[in-house]
Amino acid sequence: MSAHLNLSCKSPTPELKPPKITIMWRNLGTKRSISKSRHGWWRNVPIAPKDPILGVTEAFIADTNPNKINLGVGSYRDDEGKPVVLQCVGKAAALIDGEFQSGESDLSFVTESVKLAYGENSGLMQERRVAGVPALSGTGACRLFAEFQRRFQPESSIYLPMPTWSNHHMIWRDALVPQRTYRYYDSESKRLHFAALMNDVKNAPERSLFLLHPCAHNPTGIDPSEEQWREISHLFQVKKHFPFFDMAYQGFATGDLQKDTKALRVFLNDGHLIGCAQSFTKNMGLSGQRVGCLSILCADERQAIAVKSQLHQIARAMYGKPPVHGALLVSKILSDPDLKALWVHEVKGMVDRISGMRTTLHGKLEKLGSSVDWKHIVKQIGMFCYSGLKPEHVDRLAREFHIYMTYDGRLSMAGVTNANVDYLANALHEVTKSEGASSLVVSLPKAPIAEQTLPILADSSAQWEEFFDGDSRQDFIVD
Ligand code: PLA
């Protein structure tokens, strides 16, 4: 401002004031107008709703109580509650140290990943019918497929199980693919609602795309049996549906990586063309590396080349390529027999620890004389216990006991340890004291979670109640 005054005073002809005009123009950019325009660009942007899973971790981190427990996100922890670097990963890291990290690693990573999912001896690799690309972990693999689906099956919807991982709704929403749901879980019996599932598969229009969890279903911890997979696969053949498997927990259902691919095997034996998203986040503990693979089994090599080229092109415009370090670690582990054997052993170790904690927690609750029937804690498999706790229980657990979980009552069993299991059992007993034996019944969301704002620590559970109406079959379309 003072510069402006000084300069204008230098003008010999005050009427023209040329320097002043220049300075006045500059003056438009003074602090006040700059800050105004800066605020103007994004003034209409509202704060995004908290993520139903990641928001729990935020609340946990903000809590300073020493007894706090995070049972929100499904990340494996050891019995001291610490994140684990698998030994096989440490050894592989030493081996790849200094290795030339070029795009060449893609090939072996994809080949090894596909072998792991489709089977070592499957002839599919020799037939070159699998279009596989590295992806940004399981989330990125799903997102890439959703984008591919919208481009090449623009009229199609995606059928998601109800319930499913909350982010599935957001992934397909952002890819602008209409969503439908199919029934999966029976809240009363806490079992697979097989008849309803088959009914919904049967009633879907021919040639629909379905997302299936091949093992360790998130959040219910309930998988179809092999016989049930056969029936599902048969019905898919009749209806010409396309199965897209989101395999984020290979190994976590049974502790055996091969057994956990039984759903894929059944579908492959029946001659289906399939899609598969693989994640190494949980089973290799590579959360920070974001390693995944998207594969699509095509009718012949020509198709596979075309599909792969399109997947690469979509990825190229979104993020280029995923980082290579994690993919190198995975391909090293999968291609080295000793490292692979060590990995298989370590996966079993993680799964055994989780199922041991299920037994311990269940035993403690029985000992406390809980009136609630907690058998599902030991019956369910994988990382999660779909407890049936209601939003008001979840609220109380957070407020009074500093125990955090998602509002649907999903507990990550990977966060339970010998040191915190007594405290957890007491807290669960305390908040459910007034409940009867059969009262822990999950109410399923009545609308896609992505469509509504989920309360993380709701002041009242009324907000949450809006999500539920007890009707497990909801069809909805995202425009
Ligand atoms: N698919 C399913 C069914 C998942 O449960 C998850 C992760 C993913 C894909 C994504 O895997 P990624 O981390 O390899 O991308 N679900 C977690 C974490 C474990 C999360 O929500 O991000 C969960 O707590 O549900």
Image (cartoon, grey):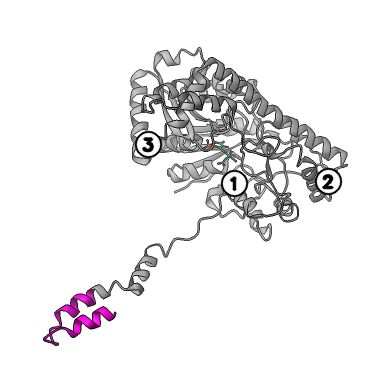
Q: Secondary structure at mark 1?
A: loop
Q: Quadrant of the N terminus?
A: bottom left
Residue for badge 1:
53
Which residue is rendered at x = 56% and y = 40% of the image? 181
* Crowd class of label 1 (few under 14; some 14 to 19; many from 20; radius 10 Å): many
Q: Nearer the viewer, mark 2 or mark 1?
A: 1
Q: Earlier in the sequence, mark 2 or mark 1?
A: 1
Q: Earlier in the sequence, mark 3 or mark 2?
A: 3
Q: CA distance from mark 1 to mark 3?
A: 26 Å
Residue 32, magenta (yes or no): no
Q: Secondary structure at mark 2?
A: loop
> Magenta part of the protein: which range?
1-25
Q: Secondary structure at mark 3?
A: helix
Looking at the picture, tell me which residue is in the foreground, 340 or 237: 340
Residue for badge 2:
436
**Mark 1 Cβ inside 8 Å of ligand 1:** yes
* Crowd class of label 3 (few under 14; some 14 to 19; many from 20; radius 10 Å): many
Residue for badge 3:
315
In the drawing, what numbered circle is on residue 451?
none
Q: Does residue 230 appear anywhere in the picture?
A: no
Q: How many marks?
A: 3
